[in-house]
Image (tube, rainbow, N blue to C red):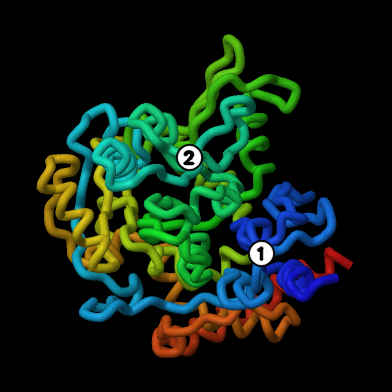
């Protein structure tokens, strides 16, 4: 057993793996596969075949080991949403792209523009598996058509960092916040211009089993061949939709995500400090309208994305896209975005309580630095204690079921 594999096993034993795939990039004797719970996890398929200094790279960049907040020089910092240079509400000017995207189609519009303009030779991302639409896979985008094919959310496991193009010079990468944090922290230099890093607000990775359960609940059982499936898009927020032969089914966002997919998010996501993509250059999110209680409204409408420039490089790219008519924007305050994203803000506000509760129950979480978790969590001490106790109780119950 090598030092790297010892470290990987420690992350797995602590249930801290996010399924990013970095370890499989560092050791080609590992491969990401779905485990019994329906989550992407590394398994040994051969003898160690490691890149130089693999254990050190893993120790500083695996999201199951550590994540540090980013504070680029000259940026402002929002206590709940992280560092930024500017923020907007935005949408694709191309109506086809705007409709296909999960919200305003901004990331898809940027993908198409980046490759067509030559700003990026390729984009490493994720999309539906054309041979098995129930599944999601890493893909490389080099054309507008491929960008459109990859439009829409993927609420299922996909290890984006198993794609070598995520580490290629002159590329761009769109991936979950934990994957982007791992990529930036890895320090793996491609020997040219570092990849442009794009991400999105992430509520967590559901089990693959939840997609299968959702399909079965809608009348497409595991014995049926699915011909087409999408989680969102073709409207905002868009409906989950699938087709198997002559059978077409769909479910609204609250039924698909709220009732079936969301409740199965893996444990590492429940103690994530960074669902908002602090390590990226550019981040997009849903810019929900809210009701009088401040709760997001999911009525169908024309898609609108929140768009954040987190680095000077991200700001330059967004301003160029605006100037070239790729996207339209209007100002957005970070406080306004925070009110439209209650899941993200509540998770960060009480994350320290979850971390302490997990530790007290015998499950050591990753180490997080620079997120101001103590300052946020101790503002409401009574609620802090409630969350701590609830987390400890759930972790003990989960550990008991495993024995």
| Residue pictured at 37% horizontal, 40% vertical | 102
Looking at the image, is 304 positioned above or below residue 356?
Answer: above
Q: Report the residue marked by disc 2.
A: 140
Secondary structure at badge 2 equals strand
Query: In front here: 167 or 68?
Result: 167
Secondary structure at badge 1 equals loop
Instruction: Indicate which disc, 1 or 2, sits on the residue closer to the N terminus.
Output: 1
The quarter of the displayed image where residue 226 is located: top right
Horizontally, residue 131 falls left or right of residue 46, namely: left
Task: Compute the Cα span from label 1 to label 2.
Answer: 22 Å
Q: Report the residue marked by disc 1.
A: 51
Horizontally, residue 246 falls left or right of residue 94, namely: right
| Residue pictured at 38% horizontal, 69% vertical | 278
Query: In front here: 293 or 94?
Result: 94
Horizontally, residue 335 falls left or right of residue 30, namely: left
Looking at the image, is 122 positioned above or below residue 392?
Answer: above
Residue that protrudes farthest toward the right in the picture = 403
Task: Inspect this view and state whether residue 203 appears.
Answer: yes
Query: In front here: 46 or 287?
Result: 46
């Amino acid at each position: 057993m090598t030092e790297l594999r010892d470290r990987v096993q420690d992350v797995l034993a602590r249930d801290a793996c996010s399924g990013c795939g970095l370890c499989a990039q560092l050791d080609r004797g590992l491969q990401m596969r779905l485990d019994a719970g329906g989550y992407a996890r590394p398994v040994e398929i051969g003898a160690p075949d490691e890149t130089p200094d693999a254990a050190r790279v893993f120790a500083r960049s695996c999201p199951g080991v550590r994540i540090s907040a980013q504070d680029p020089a000259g940026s402002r910092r929002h206590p709940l949403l992280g560092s930024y240079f500017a923020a907007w509400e935005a949408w694709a000017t191309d109506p086809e792209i705007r409709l296909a995207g999960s919200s305003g189609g901004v990331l898809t519009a940027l993908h198409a523009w980046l490759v067509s303009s030559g700003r990026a030779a390729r984009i490493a991302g994720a999309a539906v598996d054309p041979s098995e639409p129930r599944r999601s896979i890493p893909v490389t985008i080099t054309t507008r058509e491929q960008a459109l094919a990859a439009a829409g959310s993927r609420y299922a496991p996909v290890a984006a960092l198993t794609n070598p193009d995520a580490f290629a010079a002159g590329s761009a990468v769109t991936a979950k916040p934990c994957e982007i944090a791992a990529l930036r922290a890895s320090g793996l230099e491609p020997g040219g211009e570092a990849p442009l890093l794009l991400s999105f607000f992430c509520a967590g990775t559901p089990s693959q089993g939840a997609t299968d359960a959702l399909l079965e609940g809608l009348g497409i059982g595991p014995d049926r061949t699915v011909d087409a499936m999408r989680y969102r898009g073709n409207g905002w927020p868009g409906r989950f939709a699938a087709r198997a032969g002559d059978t077409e089914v769909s479910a609204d966002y609250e039924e698909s995500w709220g009732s079936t997919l969301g409740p199965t998010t893996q444990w590492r996501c429940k103690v994530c400090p960074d669902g908002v993509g602090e390590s990226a250059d550019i981040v997009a999110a849903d810019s929900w309208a809210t009701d009088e209680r401040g709760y997001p409204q999911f009525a169908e409408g024309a898609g609108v994305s929140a768009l954040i420039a987190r680095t000077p490089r991200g700001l330059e790219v967004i301003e160029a896209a605006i100037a070239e008519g790729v996207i339209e924007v209007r100002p957005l305050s970070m406080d306004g975005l925070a009110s439209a994203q209650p899941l993200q803000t509540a998770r960060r506000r009480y994350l320290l309580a979850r971390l302490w509760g997990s530790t007290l129950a015998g499950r050591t979480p990753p180490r997080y630095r620079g997120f101001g978790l103590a300052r946020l969590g101790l503002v409401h001490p009574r609620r802090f204690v409630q969350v701590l106790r609830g987390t400890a109780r759930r972790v003990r119950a989960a550990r008991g079921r495993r024995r």
